[in-house]
Amino acid sequence: MTTKIKIEDLNVYFRETHAVKNVSLDIPQNRVTAIIGPSGCGKSTILRSINRMHDMIPTARVTGRIILDSTDIYDRTSSPVLIRRRVGMVFQKPNPFPAMTIYDNVIAGYKLSGRLNRADADEIVESSLKRVALWDEVKDRLRRNAMDLSGGQQQRLCIARTIAVKPDVILMDEPASALDPLSTLKIEELIEELKDKYTIVIVTHNMQQAARVSDNTAFFYLGELVEAGGTRKIFTNPEKKQTEDYITGRFG
Amino acid sequence: MSHEEHIQDSGFAGSFNGDRIFKGITLGFAFSVILVLLLMVAGMAHESLPALRQFGWKFVSGSDWDAVQGNFGALPFIWGSIVSSLLALAVATPLSVGTALFITELAPRKLGGAIASLVELLAAIPSVIYGLWGVLVMAPWLQQTVEPFLMEHFGFLPFFRGAPYGVGMLAAVFIIMIMIIPIVTSITKEVLLAVPLSQKEAAIALGATKWEMIRMAVLPYGRSGILGAVILGLGRAIGETMAVTMVIGNTPQISLSLLAPAYTMPSVIANEFAEASSKLHSAALMEIGLILLVITLIINIAARLLIWGVTRQQSSGGRK
């Protein structure tokens, strides 16, 4: 099992708040790694460190290293723009571009990497939408506005938009928490299918979801990594008392 | 008897009556605003009847304006107003949108805030001061520097022919531009601030640079709001009276040249109402006022509709 992302001594500060404390974690390639923990434990903050989303916030400060394959993404020579093309992200609430059609949404990110001809674009739109099992539902209305889709379809559209850029890693920040149970199930099935090609890191506050979709789980509490390991082990035989209390629902 | 005592005295019925009275009074206020507008339109229409009867549609197509002969055609004023406003808007729009983008997306927060307050301060300067500056500082500069330059290098175009007067269409365009930049900038700024973070994050996470994020997520999301801002700017431009009167040269003619003096609807009203001795003359001015009122109303309604469109989009499509 190859390590895709190696997080070493990661610290994240927002002004004076120390949100993530000395976190080191290995994320294996072509596996689903779940990040769990109670609200405010820093799980989204860690996820957003992996594609340098904190760069958008002037008050945020990140120290430590995150090594993707063999490059430190926080090295001064690393370009956040290029990193984000390799590390895609899916957000909590579906956020398609409301002024664009379904087709244009899918191709929006890919277009950034350079000029492309019509045939290539058609091909990428079709394969991306097929990958997220949305093609059959939307193939007759690709020129319609993306906001006409249901919430679950919008979220799958956002995943299609992410994979159209051809990343290696997909970060998912509670991707199903704003969706109904049926759409949630579809997203979970999709995660299962995507992991043969992508390394997936998913933040979730739904423990059953973490148990269902992930191979590895990392449990965080108050900005610190409490325990990480195989999902089965974490959920059946955790080493730390804190982890056990959390997964059995005694706090959090 | 105070309102609270009233409630205590008669329980629920009392408070209900109080609310009813209050609602009735405020409803009266609200309707009085509409009534004033209607009365104004009716009054102006009535006052302009002599001109309407005498000239009919020729009033808006005729270009002869002669108070002595009693010949009134408003086309030069309509032309002057529309051309000066549209040209000013064409220059002010990119400047304003660029400024607003700098304030909201690019500048460090403190610098952005400082620029935003300065821009809003510009809107508070009385228009007569802009006019005075225009006539004493800007017009001589146009006459001695800008216009000779334009004539020398672009004189082959019909827009830059004639003599450099300083005052004229070009000066009016400059002044209007300076005056509408604050309003267009501050409304555009509000529109851009309303773009949800999730939209910008979506673009950034796809590997967009700042400029690509603006093009992909910010501008499309805000486009109808920005259009609304531009149209409100147009409303302001077309109604601007004092500063324009001071720099446009006040000559009722239709010329393609930007160097030539021109005249606008508000300017002719301001200049001539006091000396309009004949009934027909004042009726003609009144009819110009009516045309101006209708144009501004249409512009404002269009802006309202666009802004309403953008807020609706934000409440249905923007739940992210």
Image (cartoon, rainbow, N blue to C red):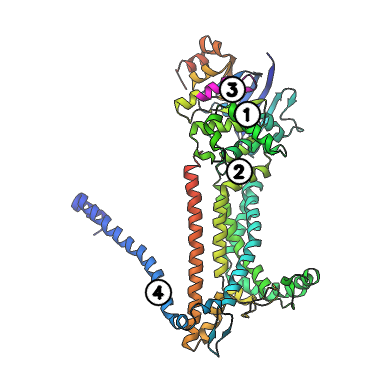
Mark 3, residue position: A224
- Mark 3, chain letter? A
Q: Mark 2 to mark 3: distance in Å?
A: 34 Å
Can see residue A60?
no
Residue hosting label 1: A127
**Crowding near pointer 4: few (<14 within 10 Å), some, many (20+)?**
few
Question: Which mark sits nearer the N-terminus, 3 or 1?
Answer: 1
Query: For residue A34, what is the image quadrant?
Result: top right
Q: From mark 3 to mark 4, how far is it between C-alphas?
A: 74 Å
Q: Compared to A161, does A207 lie above or below?
A: above
Left or right, A183 with reference to A116: left
Q: Which amino acid does label 3 sit on?
A: Glu
Disc 4 marks which residue? B42
The numbered mark 2 sits on a residue in which chain? B
Q: Residues within 10 Å of mark 2 (few under 14, many from 20)?
A: many
Helix, strand or loop status at disc 2 = helix
Which quarter of the picture shows residue A109?
Answer: top right
Identified at 59% across, 69% down, the residue is: B82
The secondary element bearing badge 4 is classed as helix
Q: Which stretch appears magenta?
A: A186-199
Quickly name the residue at label 2.
B217
The percent position of residue B159, horizontal first and vertical second, equals 71, 71
Q: In the image, what residue occupies the spot 64% across and 36% down?
A: A107
Task: Give, as a three-letter code, the residue at label 2.
Answer: Ala
**Closer to us: A65 or B302:** B302
Q: Which of marks 3 and 1 is in front?
A: 1
Does the magenta-highlighted stretch encompass residue A252? no
